[in-house]
C-alpha cells in the first residue's frame, strides 16, 4: 500500500511526500501477498532517477534477485525492463542491461512489460 501511495505521489509530482512514503515502505517491508512486489522498488528508482538515472539503474538492477525471491517473475521482468529504460536515459550501453531474469524462459513474458 505504501509503495502504491508513493507511486501516486510521484505521479502528482510530489517527490518529497513520495520519498517519505517509500522510505516507510522499505522500513515496513514488502508484504508477501503484495499484488505487485516491484511497486516500491520501481517507485524508489523513479525518485532516484529524478536526480541520477545511473543510481536509479543500479538500485533497481540490485533489486532483481529480491523480486525473483518472491516468486513474482512478472515483477522481476518489469524491473529489468525499467532498468533498460533508465540505462538508456543515463547513456549506459551495457548489453547485460537487457538480459532476461535467470528464470525467465518465455520471450513473450520477457517482452510484455516492454510495451
Image (cartoon, rainbow, N blue to C red):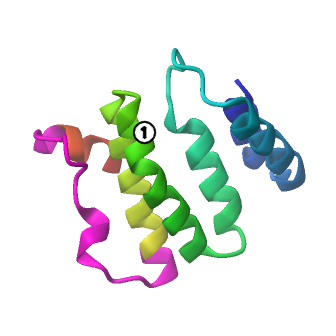
What is the crowding at mark 1: few (fewer than 14 residues within 10 Å), some, or many (at least 20)?
many
- Between 104 and 8, the one lying in front of the other is 104
Residue 56's place in the image compared with 20, above or below, is below
- 55 versus 67 height, above or below: below
Give the magenta-colored segment's residue range. 88-108
Say which residue appears at 78% left-offset and 45% top-offset: 23
In percent of width and height, residue 99 lies at: 23, 60
Please provide percent x and percent y for residue 18: 80, 46
Q: How many marks?
A: 1
Q: Is residue 75 left or right of residue 102?
A: right
Which residue is at 42% across, 39% downward?
67
Q: Is residue 27 left or right of residue 93?
A: right
| In the rendered image, the vertical position of residue 78 relative to residue 35, given as above or below | below
Which residue position is annotated with label 1?
67
The answer to if 101 sits in the magenta stretch is: yes
Q: Between residue 25 and residue 7, name the one nearer to us.
A: 25
Measured as percent of width and height from the top left, residue 19 is found at 81, 50
| Position of residue 102 in the picture relative to residue 87 (left or right) | left
The reply to whether residue 12 is visible in this rendering is: no
**Horizontal placement of 79 versus 73: left or right?**
right
Q: Confirm whether the magenta stretch covers residue 72.
A: no
Q: Tell me the quarter of the image containing the N terminus.
A: top right
Give above or below for 68 relative to 43. above
* Image coordinates for residue 98, horizontal then vertical, percent: 27, 64
Confirm whether residue 10 shows in the render: yes
The foreground one among 16 and 114 is 16
Helix, strand or loop at mark 1: helix
Name the residue: 37% across, 42% down: 76
Image point (50%, 57%), residue name:
60
Amino acid at each position: 500500500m505504501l509503495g502504491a501511495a508513493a507511486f501516486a505521489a510521484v505521479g502528482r509530482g510530489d517527490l518529497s511526500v513520495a520519498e517519505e512514503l517509500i522510505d516507510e515502505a522499505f522500513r515496513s517491508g514488502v508484504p508477501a501477498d503484495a499484488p505487485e512486489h516491484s511497486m516500491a522498488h520501481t517507485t524508489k528508482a523513479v525518485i532516484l532517477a529524478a536526480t541520477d538515472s545511473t543510481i536509479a539503474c543500479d538500485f533497481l538492477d540490485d533489486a532483481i534477485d529480491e523480486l525473483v525471491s518472491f516468486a513474482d517473475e512478472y515483477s522481476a521482468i518489469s524491473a529489468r525492463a525499467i532498468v533498460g529504460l533508465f540505462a538508456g536515459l543515463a547513456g549506459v550501453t551495457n548489453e547485460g542491461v537487457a538480459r532476461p531474469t535467470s528464470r525467465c524462459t518465455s520471450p513473450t513474458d520477457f517482452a510484455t512489460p516492454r510495451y
